[in-house]
Image (tube, rainbow, N blue to C red):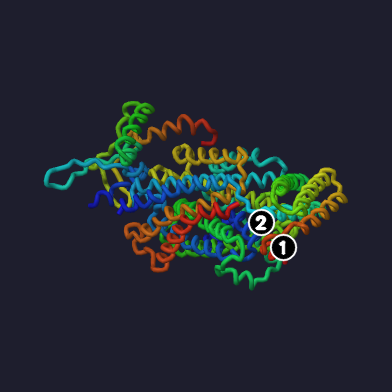
Amino acid sequence: MARIAASFANTTLCFLLGAVMLAGLAACSSSNAGGQQARTAKSAANSAIMVIDSWTAGAVPSHYAKATLRSLAQTLADFDRQQQRADVSDSSKQSARQLMAAAGRAEDAIKSGNQALAEQARQDFRNAIAKLVVAKPADQATNP
Amino acid sequence: MKKLLEISLGVVTSVGGFLEVGSLATAAQAGALFQFQLVWAILLGTICIIFLVEMAGRFAAVSKHTIADGIRERFGFNAFLWPLVSTFLVNFLVLSAEIGGVCIAAELATGIGFQLWALPVAFIAWLLLWKGTFGLIEKGVSLLGLVTLCFVAAAVILKPDWTRVAISSVPSLPHHDTATYWFMAVSILGASISPYLFMFYSAGAIEDKWDKTYLGTNRAIAGLGMSFGGSISIGVLIVATLVLAANGITQVDDYHQLPLMLTPVFGFWGFVLFVASLGIACFGATVEIALQQAYLVAQGFGWNWGEDRKPRDDPGFTMVYTVTIFAATIPIALGLDPLKLTIFSMALTAASLPLTVAPFLFLLNDESYMGQHRNGVISNTAVLFVVALGFILAVVTIPLQILGGS
Amino acid sequence: MHLVRDVLDKQIVDRNQVKIGKVDGIVARLRQGKPPRVIAVEIGSIALARRLGPRPGRWVAILAAKLGGERHAKPHRVAWSKARDIGLDIEFDIDVRKTAIFDWQVWLRDHIISKIPGA
């Protein structure tokens, strides 16, 4: 009985080891279909809006707002880079640019404590998001 | 009366100690992308862990041996090596993720990068293990963990459509992103059915010197404690749905996004509560997992062990948790993204379930260990189900990670 | 008594109820026409390594001898005649402090653990 248990465990562990290696590779590589890229950008942009709102209301410390916008700006910069190279409409490429610009404006606003500039960045985000091509029904379904 | 007090304390510590970075991250991601749809996965995972924890506790109380003891003694060293190595490796990754969780909380609170917090956090956790007793760790840290109930409070305040939540307790097919949906379900199950949870519970039963008179207490703590704990995870999912998804945030792949769940509900206190919840919950898990690694090795090899003993009385046991805690800081100190590490380790946990749960089937039916307290039909059915589930998870996890993981 | 089921890998405690280790190996004398007679149990890394195969056993034996001297080149043996109580655990009528079984733990304690305050 112990032998059966051992060989079954043996097979399982071999599988596991192979799985770990595959998973490691999978985790490293980022396979982003077009629809997911748009979703990533939209989520990042909406997150930025929430951060600006929270910061303006004094609900989050400035260092958090700054760090978060820095991180979101990087995501949006990646998105912009992808869009410029991709086979998408000019309007999509423009939206990506606008998102990146809005992120930059928001960062500056937080750094200088300028609430008006933050509000402007917020508006820029809103405009750019509206223009983002919504490819999947999921995106429409999630905005109640 | 005394037993009632013990049950209450046990339930409270289970609730406080339930949430950790895995359940938090998976619930948040699920709520953002699929709203209430994945509630069933949390429920399923919670039900499974209730059964496993009750069995682990019963095994320890009746036989005065832990599950790890039992696996070595009943299956022999060669067969024991497989669950030992796989559990040790998976635990190591989860431990790293939990340390990462504490570091993120520290970064959110202070602005100092999470990498720099890795060593200090590990040191404080180690110090607690070095100087503290089991009672202090089990009760002290877990009681502080009750702060995570803020998610339940937030969920209630947000007034979800409870009918929709109830409907989601039954599995349903996704309307979009099928691979991602199932990958998230797998990760949620891995976060809920963590082997370290039930193995730690059985070691804890020995540390607390449980005997046959504790069987009712054990059942109460397992049932109530894990249920209430699971409700916190569901709370996180509901909050993510009503705050993140509602604001157009469907993808949570940046840990900076997480505090945004509570700030609209509680304002600045939301930020504080989130940081405290994340930090305390992950710190508790860090200490528990490091301890569990030491239990696993010490019990597997038959050494003396016990958190209440002085380090000089069980040097082998002490060295294991020391080395393991500091080794686990390495991925975080090197800057590995804690959120990605978390999701990965949860999926891996799910994949390794067959190895750690299958022994339950034999141990809990073994007359020499369990006497007349062997598993009944219900418990055996539950174990068989979890083992079968574990096999399915082991097979599908990797393809799903490739197809649907972020 | 079923050796593998009831003896091998079971927890060993000494006369003071101190956990010594698990039964990592069994030493038995083969007799013609009669069942083997258990002489001793073995404890320790060498005995464990041998369970994985003869080569791992040799490697660990060489390593143990290098680290601990000749005294540790062979697995620790406890005579079966000293077994007192065989249940879930096996109690032996010995005092672990008088054996070399805990030498590595003593080394750890003296050279590492004790150096850290609060041990």
Residue B49: % across, % down: 50, 60
Residue at the limit of the structure toward the bottom, as seen here: B163
| C-alpha span from label 2 to label 1 | 19 Å
Residue B306: % across, % down: 46, 45
Chain name for mark 2 = A
Residue C75: % across, % down: 30, 35
Residue B105: % across, % down: 66, 47
- Mark 1 — residue? B246
Residue at the limit of the structure toward the right, as seen here: A116
- Which residue is found at the position 51% from the left and 54% from the top? B399
Q: On residue A35, which mark appears?
A: 2
* Image: B368 above or below C101: below
SS label for mark 1: helix
Amino acid type at circle 2 is: Gly
In the image: residue B193, left or right of residue A35: left
* Mark 2 or 1, closer to the camera: 2
Q: Tag 1: Cα neighbours inside 10 Å, few (<14), some, or many (≥20)?
A: some
